[in-house]
Image (cartoon, rainbow, N blue to C red):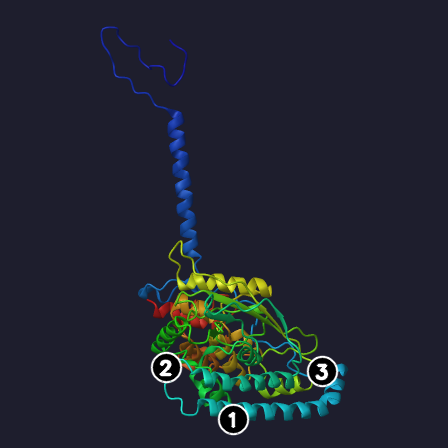
Amino acid sequence: MAENDLTTQLLPSNNSERVAEVIVDIESNGQYREEENEERGRRRRRRRERETTTIEDENPFDFLQAKHFTVPSPTPLNPFRNQTPNIEGFYEWLKIIICIPIALCRLVVFGLSLALGYIVTKFALYGWKDKQSPMPRWRCRVLWLTRMCTRCILFSFGYHWIRRKGRPVKRETAPIVVSNHVSYIDPIFFFYELFPTIVASESHDSIPFVGTIIRAMQVIYVNRFSPSSRKDAVSEIKRKASCDRFPRLLLFPEGTTTNGRVLISFQLGAFIPGYPIQPVVVRYPHIHFDQSWGDISLAKLMFRMFTQFHNYMEVEYLPVVYPLESKKETAVEFAGRTSYALACALNVVQTSHSYGDLMLLTKAAEFEQENPSSYMVEMAKVESLLNISSLEAVEFLDIFLSMNPDSRGYVRIHNFLGFLRLPRCPLTEKIFKFIDLEKSGSITFRQVILFISNLSNL
């Protein structure tokens, strides 16, 4: 008999008859069994995962096809925080005491300059009815006196000299100027330096003295919460930028003042028309007194300015940023290139905060929260990705604050259910734990607003 192996025929064959042979390949069968065992193992693991799924992982909104959402980590930066909100240190107190008599003199200079500038501006505007056309030249010449008054106002605030780097280009080269916005000093300086047309909120028109002066700048009013108003403002920017008889236009695309340590998101009004833009950087170097108009009252900021020996200000005119002609560039891309140029010159980071975050910060401060900045959510990102407006976010914050959050800004389940007047049961616990992504037993405003937007976008 042949050598004993599994492929040898068990029965001898007759030469005259051909018998079908069956060969069993043990190696292939073993590989099949190994794959089958792996598949069984995977099935067991999936079954074990399903069995160990806890109530926290269940989705109570699965019937709405709502998926689990993620909350991006908040940025630790607060772009509206004034670094020196209080008077601290022996040197600062001594300086204030010494400067009190000087401050009184400065206050007199400020009052006289403001009054004279107001009277001259009223005279320049008297009888001018065609506000849609450029201001006549003789009226502009009269307003030179108002511009000198604004320089006296800057002097009274302690800006005895202002360092400049670079020069403004001709209006024909770049009809639009954009700048970062740090203090109320910015527009006063630019009024004196450039005498531009500005874009301002409608609410500024009712401010005493200020409303009259900005009308002399042939201001373009805009309601930031009205889409139709923003559209009209863009059309007006384009109309005035296209006509050399109008002054150049000045915009603060951040839409509000910051502390100058970051650059927040840009509004697109200056970039939609597609004209060349000259960016300008404004800095306020300091050691003991932060001049930024953030979370500090205007009265306190003015008092601190009056009681300084000197306040430093630097203005740098950057190279013109041109819209790309080689390819079709969107306003978002144009704004991104301009903001990058400003951020590089300032050596700061860019964030997605906006005026909406300042509204949230102010609302939280009104409710005397211990850390109001924790309620900021980088509204520019929220608006673009989740389609929630700033006004809606403030309304949601009103609701959240009614749930009685603790000092850290966290709401526990009993406060959550108590506000909604819901009983504690497995379903309501599922809802709460669905929002509580950190599984900490409490929820934050950031989690709530993303949860609401997740449901509303279904």
Outermost front residue: 138
Query: Which mark sits nearer the N-terminus, 1 or 2?
Result: 1
Could you say which quadrant of the image residue 87 lies in? Answer: bottom right
Q: Secondary structure at mark 3?
A: loop
* Residue for badge 2: 132
Measured in 3D between alpha carbons, the distance from the residue under mark 1 to the one under mark 3, in whole angstroms, is 30 Å
Residue at image coords 41%, 47%: 44
Of discs 1 and 3, which sits in the foreground? 1
Q: Amino acid at mark 2?
A: Gln
Q: Is residue 294 visible?
A: no
Could you say which quadrant of the image residue 70 lies in? Answer: bottom left
* Residue for badge 1: 119
Query: Which mark sits nearer the N-terminus, 1 or 3?
Result: 1
Please tell me whether residue 67 is drawn above or below residue 204 in the rendered image: above
Q: Amino acid at mark 1?
A: Ile
Q: Residues within 10 Å of mark 3 (few under 14, many from 20)?
A: some
Q: Nearer the viewer, residue 124 or 137?
A: 137
Q: Residues within 10 Å of mark 1 (few under 14, many from 20)?
A: some
Q: Residue 18: x, y in percent? A: 24, 11
Q: Nearer the viewer, residue 140 or 368?
A: 140
Q: Secondary structure at mark 1?
A: helix
Of discs 3 and 2, which sits in the foreground? 2
Quadrant into which the C terminus falls: bottom left
Measured in 3D between alpha carbons, the distance from the residue under mark 1 to the one under mark 2, in whole angstroms, is 23 Å
